[in-house]
Image: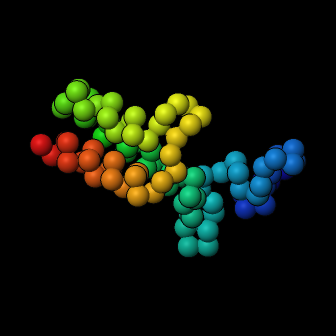
Amino acid sequence: MVAVPIEYNTGDGETQGGDAFIVYPGGDGPWLSMRLEAERRGTEDLELLRLLREHNPYLYDRPITQVFRSNSDYTDDEALFDDVYRQLLEALAD
């Protein structure tokens, strides 16, 4: 079987076309998915937090607790995310 990434799904009724892929074939080269972009941004955020822990351990928990209350309870407020990200970068710049 040859999987066509944009159409491929597991057939379980829970996945949509493309759910198994982070890069798609394109006529002019690979197309990067939103999933890949989210993974890249998350990896960068993790590295920034690691740097903050090394740079200023006292500020390390602050950005995390402003966004995450538990593993299943977190904010989806974009303005808060932007503010916390700005605070993180400022803390690293000090």
Residue at the bottom extreme, as displayed: 28
Residue at the left extreme, as displayed: 94
Q: Can you see residue 47?
A: no
**Colour scheme of the picture:** rainbow
Which of 86/55 is in front?
86
Which quadrant would the C terminus be assigned to in this image?
A: top left
Quick check: 5 left or right of 69?
right
Residue name at image x 45 percent, y 57 percent: 78
Which of 88/44 is in front?
88
- Residue 5 sits in which quadrant? bottom right
On the image, the x and y values in percent for residue 22 come to: 60, 52
Quick check: 62 left or right of 34?
left
Quick check: 28 left or right of 65?
right
Residue name at image x 43 percent, y 41 percent: 67
On the image, the x and y values in percent for residue 66 come to: 39, 40
On the image, the x and y values in percent for residue 41 come to: 43, 50
Which of 20/34 is in front?
34
On the image, the x and y values in percent for residue 38 come to: 50, 51
Q: Can you see residue 20?
A: yes
* Up-down relation of residue 47 to residue 1 (above or below): above
Number of on-image labels: 0
* Up-down relation of residue 40 to residue 26 (above or below): above
Residue name at image x 63 percent, y 60 percent: 24
* Up-down relation of residue 70 to residue 45 (above or below): above
